Amino acid sequence: MTIKEAQEIVDKWIKEYGVRYFDEMTNMAILTEEVGEVARIMARKYGEQSFKPGEEKELGDELADVMWVLICIANQTGVDLTEALEKNLQKKTCRDNKRHINNPKLKE
């Protein structure tokens, strides 16, 4: 599935099952909540915290929740995520094409 297809699928789902998009600020709050759930899993699975009994969730599912809400925000604000990502990659390539290669902290 392409990013464009994902945006179209989410839009279709919202219109068919979700009634309408939540407003932008509600979706921003939901995005923050979902990122927090990813952070919780990361801290427990890869960090030094441990899971509480029955707490473990699937990282992939939580990352997909983040993508879902991010796509919702893009759709309702008219952002073409394919175009935005392409421009962002170009910006990073121009700005950082030597930065990380020359960073002694990243040398093995």
Image: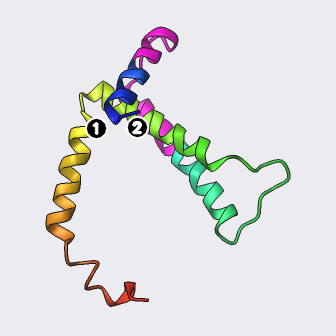
- Residue at 38 percent across and 88 percent down: it is 107
Q: Amino acid at mark 1?
A: Leu
Find disc 2 in the rendering and name its residue: 70
The secondary structure making up most of the magenta span is helix
- Residue at 28 percent across and 38 percent down: it is 81
Q: Position of residue 7 (x, y in %)?
A: 36, 28
Disc number at residue 27?
none
Per the rendered image, the range of residues in magenta is 12-33
> Is 92 drawn above or below residue 55 in the view shown?
below
Asked which secondary structure carries label 1, the reply is: helix
Give the quarter of the image for residue 91: bottom left
The answer to if 17 sits in the magenta stretch is yes
The answer to which of marks 2 and 1 sits earlier in the sequence is 2
Find disc 1 in the rendering and name its residue: 81
- Position of the N terminus, as image quadrant, is top left
Give the quarter of the image for residue 104: bottom left
- Position of the C terminus, as image quadrant, is bottom left
Q: Is residue 22 visible?
A: no
> Is 12 drawn above or below residue 38 in the view shown?
above
* Of 25 and 83, the residue lying toward us: 83
Are there few (<14), some (14-19), or many (20+) residues within 10 Å of tag 1?
some
- Residue at 75 percent across and 50 percent down: it is 56
- Residue at 59 percent across and 46 percent down: it is 60
> Is 106 drawn above or below residue 21 in the view shown?
below
Q: Position of residue 46 (x, y in %)?
A: 64, 67
The answer to if 47 sits in the magenta stretch is no
